[in-house]
Amino acid sequence: MTKKIVLVSGGAGFIGSHVTVELIAAGYNVVVADNFSNCDNTCFEGVKKITGREDIPLEKVDFCDAEAARALFRKYPIDAVIHFAAFKAVGESVAQPLKYYKNNLQSFMNVLEAAQQQGGCQVLFSSSATVYGEPDQVPVTEQSPRKPATSPYGNTKQMCEDILQDTVKASGGRIKGILLRYFNPIGAHPSALIGELPRGVPNNLVPFITQTAIGKRECLSIFGNDYPTPDGTCLRDYIDIVDLAKAHVYAVTRMVEGKMKADCEIFNIGTGRPVSVLELVNAFEKVNGLKLNYKFAPRRSGDVTAIWADPSLANRELGWKATRTVEETLQAAWAWEKHLAGKD
Ligand code: UFG
């Protein structure tokens, strides 16, 4: 059987690079496309080392350019596309909403249009638990209601979900879609050759922790210790990046093998395990044998108190399950930070 071709838009970034590794390991041919607006080639080079493949096609493409998107679909007989190419900083999206609406919506619509013009393909969209907002009940299932987005970034995730669902409906079966709603992806590849590479001051918790531990940041602020949770800090569902990447392989395989039960399916990708900010910090210190400089600070606006996944649908339907412990993941995150600092 000829190998299926998967286009990974935003494939040089944090999640895209881990997904590329797992797709190649599973026997797919991958075309990586990225405009490098939010990353350099560190992770792409890492992917080549991990897979031992020098020949992975890399296309420097900005998907906001409709013709460039079409050209890519003409050049390769793409069976499935995984769409990551998007801006993702919540705070920046509040300050510069048009930048987010223009980029995140336009690029996805161009991908869909190009796919449609080539006769269709399978589309996997990287969505987020942010679409559930502050949930009425935890854990959240795929049936839990979507809440009004609290940022333009979150709004683009909801809008792209709708755009894909409407496009699938109108395509007469030529486009099929899966929406993966990620909880909090953290960690790095066990090789420490790829991982998260935030530009400037990290917004997310784990890169802030590792940068504080390495001495790049003075002190971690834990945003809020007066939440109605057991230790007063927020609860999240931290999902290992390699586990998360594998979920994409299961989802793509389900699509290309025609095993979907509906033309557009939604899956929560999480562990089902709530972990507080303080628990995560303590686990990081313990497993890596170090002390972290941290303090409690006021709540961060827009944060929800507690959210974690009910991943049973993905477990059952995709045959996928998160396997890594928080400790293993935090060890990998620390190894990656040390790799970046050239200290190992
Ligand atoms: N946190 C801190 N200090 C920090 C950074 C984060 O205490 O320096 C806390 C946050 O307050 C939150 C938890 O750590 O309680 C996790 O925060 P992250 O920023 O790592 O993740 P979020 O849960 O806020 O982010 C998730 C997704 C984003 C998405 C966002 C939408 O990872 O992609 O939900 O709300 F945009």
Image: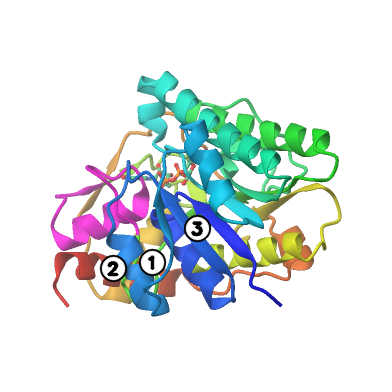
Q: Is residue 185 magenta?
A: no
Q: Tell me, yes or no, whether the two marked residues, 1 and 3, touch with CB atoms within 8 Å.
A: no
Q: Which residue is mark 2?
A: 336
For residue 275, the mark is 3
Instruction: Give me the C-alpha separation between circle 1 and circle 3.
Output: 18 Å
Disc 1 designates what residue? 188
User: Between disc 3 and disc 2, whose residue precedes?
Assistant: 3
SS category of the residue bearing label 3 = strand
Residue 108 pos. (x, y %): 56, 36
Disc 2 secondary structure class: helix
In the image shown, does 249 or 225 lie closer to the viewer? Answer: 249
Give the mark nearest the N terminus, 1 or 2: 1
* Residue appearing at x 59%, y 44% in the figure: 127
Q: Position of residue 31 (x, y in %)?
A: 50, 59
Query: Helix, strand or loop at disc 1?
Result: loop
Q: Which mark is first along the chain, 3 or 1?
A: 1
Q: Nearer the viewer, mark 1 or mark 3?
A: 1
Residue drawn at x 55%, y 44% is 306
Q: CA distance from mark 3 to mark 2?
A: 22 Å
User: What range is drawn magenta here?
Assistant: 196-220
Residue type, numbered disc 2: Trp
